[in-house]
Image: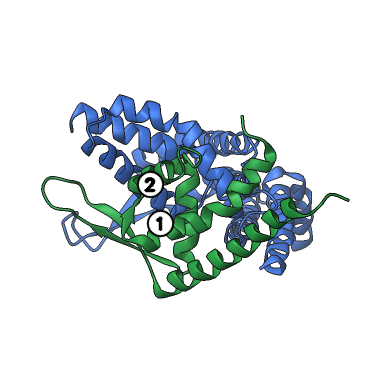
Chain colours: A green, B blue
Amino acid sequence: MESRFERQLKKGALEMLVLGLVCAGPTYGYELLGSMARCSNGLFALKEGTLYPILYRLEDDGLIEAQWRTSGGRTAPKKYYTATPEGHAAYAVQRKAWRAFADCVDGFDKEEPL
Amino acid sequence: MTEQEKKIKRYVSAIERELRLPLKAKARINGDIGTDIHARLEKGQSIDEIIAEMGTPQEVAAGFNEEMQDQLLPKGSPWRWAFLIAAILAGGAALLSMLPFLLFYFQSSGMGVIGGADGPMAIFITGAANLLAPVLTPLWLAVPFILGCCAACVLLRWGQNGPRAKHTLALMLSAAALLCWLLLGILSLWQASSAVDATAGIAVLSWKTLLFQLLNLMLLPSFWLPVVTLCIAARRRKTASLRQ
């Protein structure tokens, strides 16, 4: 059972990570669930109820676009998410902010205790 | 439809039922969950394995409801079902009380023919006044009450923080109920006064007496229920407008 602190931390980073994966190339929901779990070594093993609301928020904000596509063969059509130019720009800003935040937090370790 | 498709449909429908979100959001989720299941099937998972991995419909819906709290619809009060039952009972009672008159009316020979022969060109006229009197009172008592119950149902379903459109609907239902009450009431009392005049030979009821009777009948739920729902709906609608 993860602590409240861990949950808050994850929640803060989640939107940025999902946007980052969509920025890497067109992808669909189930693929994103797998990518999130794989890239985070299981730390971000999400459920549909967590992932899709994030995708809806990103789509409503105009950062990503959804499009139904068939990948050929007898496969069912899938809803592919693609990052818009605004999405790419927003991801760059978020990464920069995250880096600054992480560096600041790491800096506390280097400080001598009072 | 194969057994697998039936299972998918049942699972997705069960999730949809548990969602407390607007229809647009439900449709979006429905499509995505369906795609997700098909993507998992293509990876070789069975439908039972998929359901076990995704969780029960309640668990899946709870996740969406929690993450989309800004769109969450209020949980309706269970008291709305009491009003629905009351409306059905009132409708049934009104129909039952009118039934003997309706049957008698259609079976009786109170039908006249003008225009010559009883052929295709003949015009049939019926004694509308004979039917009007016995059906007016049940209609007067039932229709405004049913409309008032419907308004109460809408108010209880959406609660104080419901969308403005729903409060407007409750307001319109209440207003329609009061209008029906007034129109049917005037017609009913007018009909009653005519009947007294024709059969007993006494003077027609004065407008003052009719008005007094109308005021007296305001004590009935077919009047005060729509009045109460109208006031609540108007207040909630105003609050919703300010919220927007």
Three-letter amino acid code at disc 1? Answer: Leu
Marks 1 and 2 in Cβ contact (< 8 Å): yes
Q: Nearer the viewer, residue A61 or A84?
A: A84
Three-letter amino acid code at disc 2? Answer: Ser
Crowding near pointer 2: few (<14 within 10 Å), some, many (20+)? some
Pointer 1 or 2: first along the chain: 1
Q: Which residue in the structure is indicated by mark 1? A: A21
Q: Nearer the viewer, residue B34 or B217?
A: B34
Q: Taking A69 as reference, is B172 left or right?
A: right
Q: Nearer the viewer, residue B174 or B211?
A: B174
Q: Which residue in the structure is indicated by mark 2? A: A35
Label 2 SS: helix
Q: Chain for mark 2?
A: A
Residue A107 appears anywhere in the view = yes
Does A102 sit above or below residue A51?
A: below
Q: Residue furthest left?
A: A73
Q: Taking B115 as reference, is B98 left or right?
A: right
Residue B173 point in image, percent of width and height? 59, 56
Does B174 sit above or below residue B20?
A: below
Q: Nearer the viewer, residue B162 or A40?
A: A40
Where, by quadrant of the figure, is residue A23 drawn? Answer: bottom left
